[in-house]
Amino acid sequence: MEIQKNKFLIFLFISFFALAAKAQVNDAGLWTSVNLEKEITKKLSVSLSEEVRMNENISEVGTIFTDFGINYKVNKYIRLGAYYRYINKRQVDDSYSERHRYYFDLTLRGKYRLFTLSFRTRFQSQYADIYSSPEGKTAENYSRNKLSLKYDLNKKIGFFASYEIYTPLRSYDQVFKDNTRYNFGLEYSFNKMHSIDLSYLIQQESNVKKPWTDYIICLGYNFGF
């Protein structure tokens, strides 16, 4: 009975995923990533991620980045993180713009039986084209808040969903948000070291005349050791 229930839930998720993936209004994307995490101590770890993001209906490479971070577990409820991301972002003339991003995370987590609820608040600062643009020395700052819920179906399979708001920290434009992300997905663990995740992300602009919406399939491989 339990096996049949698990198969039904997985089938339901894949069916919903397939239907949602057809809802392409403005653009469709594919984000693929490889994520590595090395545990230094029980509280301290370092991470390295490489990601390729395709856009224009998955026809061109839009963004490539490398991300390095340090993570610290204060206790089972609180985590801290500091990260650097080097980004190459495609421009309209098909050239690539260099971006340097620094960001800091505070994550609160709580678990009840098979459910895990987490809230992450992030401050990020990004510089674009430092040596080739007059605005290169001006940082673009954001506050990002994300609420996530995960349900562990069993030791190998988990479902998750999240909601994230981007708040620009600009003195000339006081708006609460200019970007929103909705994400839901499935995580499969092969063992304690290897796992993959598949999700569907909807990204929407806010407070602009013609808001853009992206429908994105995300596929990631995770390796922890």
Image (tube, rainbow, N blue to C red):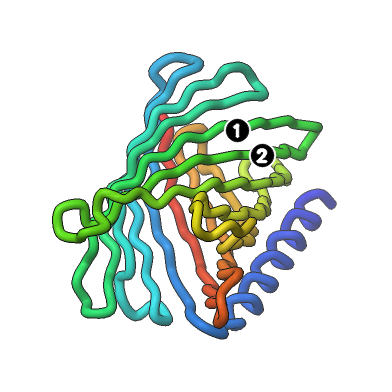
Is residue 50 depicted above or below 114 in this figure? below
Give residue 102's quadrant in the image.
top left
In this rendered view, identify the residue nearer to me: 11 or 48: 48
Q: Residue at x 63, y 47 (%)?
A: 146
Where is residue 96 drawn, in percent x and y?
A: 22, 66
Label number found at residue 82: none
The residue labelled by disc 1 is 107
For disc 2, the neighbor class at 10 Å (few under 14, some 14 to 19, many from 20) is some
Mark 1 or mark 2: whose residue is earlier in sequence: 1
Res 107 quadrant in image: top right
Q: Secondary structure at mark 2?
A: strand
Tell whether label 2 touches label 1 (CB within 8 Å): yes
The residue most toward the left is 131
Residue at 67 percent across and 24 percent down: it is 77
Most extreme residue toward the bottom, as rendered? 25
Residue 119's disc is: 2
For the C terminus, the image quarter is: top left
The residue lying toward the viewer, choosing from 220 and 3, is 220
Q: Residue furthest right?
A: 1
The number of numbered badges drawn on the structure is 2
Give the structural element (helix, strand or loop) at label 1.
strand
